[in-house]
Amino acid sequence: MSQRLLLSFLPLGLLALLVSVMAAPASAQTQQPEKRIALVVGNGSYAKEPLATAANDAGLIAQTLQAAGFDVIGARDLDGDTLRKSFRDFIKKAEESPSDTVAMVYLAGYGIQLAGENYFIPVDSAINRDADIPIEGMRISDYTRQLATLPLKASVVVLDAARQQPFIQGGEPIAGGLALVEPGPNMLVAFNAAPGTVAPSEGGPYGIYAQSLAEMIRTGGLSLPDVFDRVRLRVSEASKGAQIPWDAQKLQQPFSFFDRAPDAPPAQGTPDQVAAFRDRPIRDLGAQDAFTAALERDSVQGYEDFLTAYAGDPLSKRVRAILAARREAITWRRTYLADTPDAYWSYLRRYPRGSHAADARRRLSILTAPLEPPPSFAMLDYDVPPPPPDEGIYVDRPVLYFGDPDFGFEPPPPPPEYYLPPPPPDFVVLAPPIVTVGLFILPRPVFVPIPVFVRPPGHVAPPPNNIVFANIHNTAVINTVINQPAATPNSPTAAAAARAGTPGPSLPPAVAQRASLIQQGKLPVPPSASINPTARPGRPSVIPTNVAPNALPQGQAPPRANALPVPGARGAPPPPGAHLGTAPATPTGSTSPGAPGAATPPPGPGIPGRVNPALVPPKPPVAQTQPMTRPGEHERRGPPPPSQTATRPALGVAKPSVAPPPPRPQMARPTPPPVRAAPPPPRPQMARPAPPPVRAAPPPPRMAAPAMRPAAPPPAMARPAAPPPRPAAPPPRPAAAVAKRCPPNVPRC
């Protein structure tokens, strides 16, 4: 009552000011920009069985997230220690971010489930038995639980890792695919294949799941659950039913990767059509639309409704396999959470030959319980009914693959176009990624421009150093900067790229530190680099610490760890023959004309690395302008120092500096040309062996004459008509003159 009286006596202007001050924090909170961060990892260079698309898929998702305004850090082919450090750094980055932050993790590689836990496998893992999995693999739940405790707007964890593992071949089998999990608060968890199933092997350049996810993110106007629902339909259509993705979410706030402009064409059919498709009972739809509706809802109830309505349809066998895998995954999840002997006996009672039967026996041994249950035990009350007898053929196996030809499934029908239109024509067949140079660097896909009516939400904070986000519609920058292997140092596109940022994501701090140590020779090159598709066998690519990723031209190899300096590089000796008048080495940072993948420019002025014959003056006669050099003399002296190596300017006409440096007379031991041209007249009194000492040890005046001459021009610029500087005849020799003068009447002295 007193507060009301106080407010009644306040002046009207002061009251309005007080209300505005009280409302200011709330309005500032609503206008706070949304920060987006992402960690993307693609592990494909496994020693036992490499994956062709894992690194490319990670690069595609990283680029798509960059376009959506995410501050992306990403890497490929990480070992266990670097992978765990990268995750810890990302969790710390999420902790330091404001509450209105969206964090996303995408992992492509091999994933293994063991005893209800999912493990992402590093490339250096040495897994030969089930006991090695917890030691060598990275347990996903250790990091998803940390993300769930953070006050983030949303967190998304995508595991593109449900594949048939090649590590354990004998002994007790382990279940295939990934284990069913429960997402944390404000979290969405997605698998590329349903729990307990595996995706087919793919040859590339991109996997079906990654390409479908990138397509749905770029569609715009879709909520986060809608994105993954449509991904499931697209993957099922593209794989002909062999792969069925899965996701679960507990999101509380709306989120969309992109918005669609008001004048944009609809992403789906009319709202009435979409609502009818989603809300109508399965039995009220046709068989094909009912299958699509059940797949879109992806629930046990939806699949059971289809089997009830269309038990005799050819699609019922496929639906029964999907339901069998889901029912078994839920049963094992409840069993693992209970973690009692009664629970494991209950699972073995339902699935004596199920994919997790070996897991149940392992846990019973750990709990020191007998494998056979007692005559009477408390059967665990599961949330799903027991499987019918006809489901056993799908779950009584370690690995379930929906594309198995033994099942004889009918191919699934395409989704109705009003609900899932066909993919954009420019996003159906994607070109292979641009070749990137550098250890741990993700492949960089060719960026397809996003339609102009699809835009990032206005409340998204622009990520730092992200050229993709600022040019998702700019075809000029996309074609000249983003989709180029590397821009020339002096080109306008290079200046624009330097101002706007780099096309690819940055390395995680732990990965960048390890790459730096490898470059310095303090750490060995990982074995996974030898089977890196973008590196030559035995010559792993290592990015220098002072060079930004993707900054080296296509076809030019970066310096290798513990390698000798590259001839022609700055601070390194020139290549053999550089001091003999050959073309100079290409400066560091430009594409070598002879490098693989580099275009060979035509000879002409201003072309670095080429000498135009029309611009080089003719060479003068050797006998008049160049001293003769004895064979092997260059090998003894070695090449000239780097300061004397000829270097061609980057632009402009070729200069005389391309010619070889002037000879050093004091180091050469030439044969005097005048002696050969005009030998002195024969004299009987002179000894014949005198000339060899003259050639071997010229007198001081003969060596001093070249030093007293003015600086001679380079041999390449000398004029052939110039007279020889040396005299036509040698000077008198004092020793010979004394021998001629004898006393009279004395024949010999």
Image (cartoon, rainbow, N blue to C red):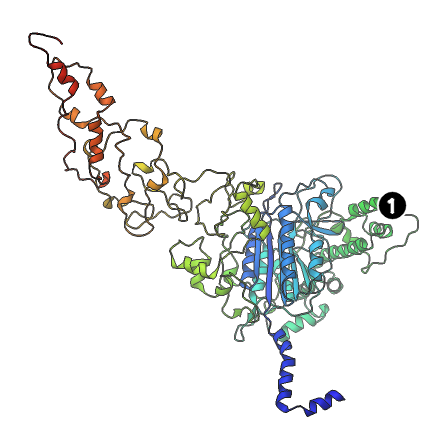
Residue 745: percent from left, percent from top: 6, 7
In the rendered view, does 8 fall on the left or right side of 208? right
**What's the residue at 35%, 28% (across, down)?**
636
* Viewer-proximal residue among 369 and 104: 104
Residue 469: percent from left, percent from top: 51, 64
In the rendered view, does 595 fall on the left or right side of 617? right
Q: Which residue is mark 1?
A: 369
Q: Quadrant of the N terminus?
A: bottom right
Q: Quadrant of the C terminus?
A: top left
Residue 536: percent from left, percent from top: 50, 41
Q: Residue furthest left?
A: 745
In the rendered view, does 421 fall on the left or right side of 605? right
Q: Circle 1 — which element?
A: loop
Disc 1: CA contacts within 10 A as few (<14), some (14-19) or many (>=20): some
280 vs 696: above or below: below
In the rendered view, does 168 fall on the left or right side of 555? right
Does any portion of residue 413 appear in the rendered image? no
Amino acid tagged 1: Ala
* Viewer-proximal residue among 624 and 410: 624
Does any portion of residue 599 appear in the rendered image? yes
Q: Residue furthest front?
A: 743
* Viewer-proximal residue among 567 and 351: 567
Residue 451: percent from left, percent from top: 50, 67
521 vs 140: above or below: above
